[in-house]
Amino acid sequence: MERSAPPRPDRKQRLTHHANENVRFAALMTFLGTTDIAYDELIKIVEGDPDPKMQEWALRWVLTGTPGKIMEKRPARQRGLKDVAAVAAMIRKRAQTPIRKFLIALLPKVEDYDDEGWKELNKLYKELGRGAGLSRDEHIAFIGAFAHHSNSVNLLWDNLTHADDAIREAAIDGFVELGEPGRAFLGKRLNASGEERQQRGAITALDRYDHTRMEWRPRGSALRALAGHAQKSDDPTLRSTVLRLLLAADWTLVEVARELVEEASNDPAPRVYNLAAPLAERLGANITMGEKPKAATIADVTPLVAAAEPANGHRVFTDQRRANCVACHQVDGIGAQFAPPLSDAGIRMTRDQILESILKPSARITEGYHVNTIVTKTGEAYLGVVRNETDNTLELFQADARSIKLQKEEIVHRGTSPESIMPPNIGELLSAQEIADLAAWLMTRKTKPVDPQKGG
């Protein structure tokens, strides 16, 4: 006969009062996945139980709601944390224990960061040695907490100079989280002669704001600084970002942008020209536009691959403003599964095949990844890649990463497109060097991917 769990009061008694830590841990496990234990009760275990394993598992549940799994991101301030001082006290008490990192991960989830809460957070940050006394994950958690109060702008600004890319990225996200106070601060700090990493971070953060919702009227000095950064840089990503910001700004300083637009229209990177053209039209001034650059070809890119930079190719692959390949392709478990996985691209494809797949995507479509168009009896139309087809059903994997299961008897039309879903004009969107860098990075991918349908 199957034994049922003890009544709730008995389990609670074992959880908090039993002398044997294994019995207490077993009692805790009976609550996981239920609603029979309150958040405050879990915090009491963290604060009062002498067993580190009990503390760690209770904290994991507080952080994620999932036993044994710590998720990287959850909606901030989700689980009812209200008192910064209480969390700070727990961190101080266990500053030299393994669970400190879990406690620090609670900080971005605190609900109310008023002035007093911010002072307590800043005090704790200093006590722990600022960034120097923290691990990367702890440092990022502090930045996430600081991003809830406008007093933090100077601290976020300082972190834009950090040597760790992940910490600088967290500071950029922190400015965006602050909203208008963050945007106003960055606009005032733009300086064409400022520290390069801070200035690039500021430009990147400004580019991530939704300027359609938040009207942007930057000062003339900010616009001049933006133009100055673009003029002195040979990075097409920075130049195109600046042009996007100038397009988003509500301004009339034609003289600031005239020279920049004329220079940009002669830029060898096609996407820079593509942004300069509408900006020139908006200015309504007499601007002499250069000839539109020709799209990069396989012949242009091939000689550049040998000396290309794979690290930049990785950035091209993931950057939403550039290729954004992860929207469809998956590498090493990251990205969507709409297009063929590329973790093993360096094994199964030569350099020339990689370049052809980038610049002539419809020339050779991987088996199983042809795009299907399907129309049902009810008139609904679907576009996607067919997975798991049987005699009666098929599963269609769509570009938005969702799948739908359809009964074949409900389908009135099914067609296969000879064209790849991949844009055919990559040569117009990226420079020849960026494509070479992307190809060089893909050539380093030599891990056989796991079939998501078959598992490990």
Image (cartoon, helix red, strand yellow):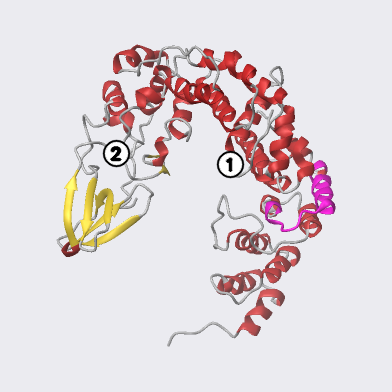
Amino acid type, callout 1: Asp
- Seen from the viewer's position, the closer of residues 31 and 157 is 157
The magenta stretch spans residue 416: no
First of labels 1, 2 by sequence position: 1
- Residue type at mark 2 is Ile
Residue 136 visible (yes or no): no
Q: Is residue 211 visible?
A: yes
**What stretch of residues is rendered in magenta?**
107-126
Task: Give yes or no for residue 121 being in the magenta stretch.
Answer: yes
Horizontally, is 87 left or right of 250 in the view? right
For mark 2, what is the residue? 421
Q: CA distance from mark 1 to mark 2?
A: 28 Å
- Residue 32 falls in image quadrant: bottom right
Name the spot of residue 334 as percent of width and height, x first: 43, 42
In the rendered image, the quadrant that contains the N terminus is bottom left
Which residue is label 1 attached to?
A: 210
